[in-house]
Amino acid sequence: MSYNFAARFLLAALTVVLISGCGEMKGPILASNGDDDSGPSDSLVAGGSSFAYPVMNHWTSYYNKETGVQVNYQSLGSSGGIKQFTVKTLDFGATDAPMTEEQLAEAKDDVLHIPVVMGAVAVTYNLPGVKSRLTLSGEVVANIYLGKIKKWNDPAIAALNPSVPLPAADIVTVRRADGSGTTFIFADFLAKSSPEWEKIVGVGNSLDWPADSIGGKGNEGVAARVQQTKNSIGYVELVYALQSKLSTAAIINQAGSAVIPSIATVTAAAAELTTIPEDLRLSITNAPGEKAYPMAGITWIVARTKMDNTSKALAVQAFLTYILSDKSQATADKLNYSKLPPKLLELARSKINKISGIN
Amino acid sequence: MSRKTRIAYGGSAHISRRRLYNAVWLVVMGLCALALIAPLAGILGYLIYKGFSSINIAFFTELPAPVGEPGGGVANAIVGSLMVISMGAIAAIPLGIMTSVYVHEFARGSRLATIIRFVCDMLNATPSIILGIFAYSVVVLSTGQFSAIAGSFALFVMMTPVVVRGTEEILRTVPDSIRAASLALGASRWQTIWKVVLPAARRGITTAACLSLARIGGETAPLLFTALGNDFWNFDPTRATNTLPVQIFKFASSPYPDWHRQAWAAALLLVLGISITNAVARFATRTKTVA
Amino acid sequence: MTPASSEIINVESRTPRVRRFKAVASTILRRNDRIAFSISLGSGLLTIALLAGILYQLIFLSLPAIQRYGLGFLISSEWDPVHKKFGALPFIYGTLVSSAIALLIATPFGIGTALYLTELAPRKLRGIIAFVVDMLAAIPSVVYGLWGIFVLAPFIQESIAPILQKYLGFLPLFQGRCDGVSMLTAGLILAIMVVPFITAIAREVLLTAPGELKAASLALGATEWETIWKVILPYSRVGIGAGVVLALGRALGETMAVTMVIGNMPEISASILRPGHSMAAVIANEFREADSAIYLSVLVEIGLVLFAVALVINLAARLLLWRMRGVAKN
């Protein structure tokens, strides 16, 4: 190899490296995956709700086996899903709380909320010596978190649990430290049960907690705090409570009956809905019906009506059709999620074809 | 100090107390060294005990299984890691070598060389999570997508200073006499570097490159929001990609015992891979024949 | 060779011989040379551009947060992303405390091991211990974290914490409930991770101590320990100090292992058995999830602070090393 050749070879190699290095610095717009005219794209990137991650993971895995299409769903939390969806690094997001007006404005385009699965919030507690299941009402839980009920043997709790020997201990309240759809559902129900809660605290993914409480990150965090703190009370996603075998309280619903949180009682909560808003951003807390669990919620997929790329739009449509099929909904049931009741399922399906490409 | 060096025994209590002190402290130092074996044995032991049983053919050939289903593997994570690391290395190794050629061959002792060397030390000291932020803002935000390229860019920035300093040290072991000899025979500076210095340092540079690979092979933090993760196969550098360390983190922070088992197995694999790379590096130096 | 060990040997030698060599070399610069020179110069400049790019991006992205929260950001301990109230103190505190615990534990072990390796160990054992130290340095952070949550954290919760609370429970340092994940757990994991750094650097420094000094000390009747304590350690003090400072830099920036075992609670507690948070951990945890521009900007600002601290620490170590070389020359 002559010296000249060697030098030129090295020069060429280095130029490639440097240009690619500089290119990366400036950030070229990478070619979009999937040609606009060649039918549905074979890969999508999605993310959001960590609550829905297991069932989404299950669906995407089987969808890939059946169709060869990759839907890469990453667990980012509902807030993360909405944010990355807004900056368009994700093709669609998933969230346990509907996007707020402010978030919708930030996303600019028309955003669809498509319910895909339901969950619930369970009130969990750690009372050594109390073996039987507690019954609580929305008002009592609100007063506990407002700091108005301070002891476990408060008359208001005792009246709901006449046969339970309640200790005279201080109640330690545990809450989510991060923004979460779980907190949204919890607060939504409390606001409907207690005017005072609505006035002082309100509803949101995260709250200005009125009284002293311990914060835990994620469902695991709250569950761990409750398990390790005597005389504590907290709230976690139902799936998590069932998997971790936590003690959960029965909650008095709108019809006045004490309902144990379970997959069936959550589906029941959405079964007897009379008015459903057109954009499907509905709340199913404090739902009517004898068997309806009052702290139930929905996980939505958020997608754009006008996507930048037609092949992606077709792929999102196809995937949503798959997860809203009767078969996929039945799988959700097996994984401790509650499937959508027929009426809501119909409405959700009717939204799918509103997704389209820009051209 | 040789152990044969003994202090003559003195009869006084003072001397025997000194000898006692001596013995006690020597034992304490030995114990310090031996104490390090405990965490290593603990970690390696657990990796093998918990991970080995989950390693089978499927572990190397299959995608991660969905929640609640047994089996599955980390094949896509292995491929993704190799892709991200090799893309980073392809950029970092030539850049690193050329930089150290500048620092030690062309501009030895110059002010700019000192600055470059200093900059490399600073890059080396930069926490890896910062490189993640850098790659996110430079690559992910500007391209609008998470990608293997973004991940390898972060690793590239991390790897470059390690290669520069490693190579420079090797170049320093090449005696100036052979440079002078080459120049005296009429070779140009570049001919001297390309035909004499670099060949003489080849094994050492291989070692430096391997060590830098081992250093970035287990990095997780810079990949979390660049390569992101992927539950499927991906061979396209412009898409989100699974990597072994990120998959371990995902497995470990899940509430599912089945995934915890796989986390141990994947960790065993990762440690094995890094150890092999380190061993290759060591082997290359051991048979080194510089000048 | 660990990465750390390479950091110490870079003594710039500008001996007359080198200068003579440069004089000869500079006379012969041909066309190929110029090309190669430009390429290598470009590579060097690109390396500088990388560091400048990092600094620029960090400052540029954190500007909104700096403008909005000012310096109060660094001393506020409130962390409520939903209401856009941000304070970095719990993270700065957590990073400092976990690193301090790590160094308190790792320093004696690291120096003890280095002394044993250089001064005492029989040849066979020396190989084994050097291997152990290298392996500890090679294990990735995420694997330490995995081991931390499933093995070390339960062990601390069930065995260490009760003992500490029984005998030292009167100290605020050991009060409160221990959930396993805690400042102490993070400190311990970090200690294991930085011991190899301290050992590697201390060992290099100890090897530079002149043999005549040792021989003289022993000849005067000092015991081996007295020689180490009164002759070798004072001689190597500065260099070992630099090693410890470099290890501190490592510990401060460590991300995955810490976030997996520290508990990720943005609270300041006097007790090291309580969970905490760290600067690197909060970025790793919340960067993808940050749902507003200002939240993201705040996280980048924490990154900027971390970057600055890491660089300052590194500079300090380098100054110590310079001083050591000064001592060695005199």
Image (cartoon, rainbow, N blue to C red):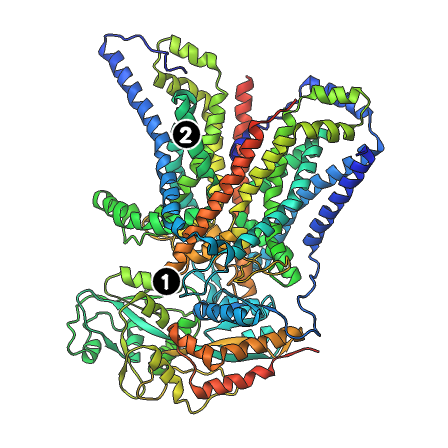
* Chain for disc number 1: A
Q: Which mark is residue B253?
A: none
Name the quarter where the N terminus of chain A is drawn: top right
Residue drawn at 36 percent across, 16 percent down: C224
Task: Confirm whether residue B127 shows in the render.
Answer: no
The vertical placement of C107 against C286, above or below, is above
Q: Residue at x 31, y 79 (%)?
A: A138
Residue that numbered label 2 is attached to: C128
Secondary structure under tag 1 reads helix
**In x, y percent, where is residue C207?**
48, 22
Q: Residue at x 44, y 47 (%)?
A: B268
Mark 1 touches mark 2? (CB < 8 Å): no
Which of these two is toward me, B218 or A172? B218
The kind of secondary structure element at disc 2 is: helix
In this rendering, which labeled residue sits more in front, label 1 or label 2?
A: 2
Q: Residues within 10 Å of mark 2 (few under 14, many from 20)?
A: few
Q: For the residue marked with disc 1, what is the amino acid?
A: Glu
- Please state which of residues C203 and A211 is positioned toward the viewer in this rendering: C203
Label 1 and label 2: CA atoms lie apart by 41 Å
Q: Amino acid at mark 2?
A: Ile
Spot the residue most to the right. Answer: C31
Disc number placed over residue A220 in the picture, else none: 1
In the rendered image, which quarter is residue B24 located in?
top left
Q: Position of residue A264 (x, y in %)?
A: 34, 81
Residue A161: image quadrant is: bottom left
Residue C40 horizontal/vertical position (percent): 73, 37
When asked about the image quadrant of residue B16, the answer is: top left
Give the letter of the chain under mark 2: C
With A11 as the anchor, is B235 left or right in this view?
left
Left or right of B95: which side holds C287?
A: left
Q: Position of residue B135 (x, y in %)?
A: 61, 53
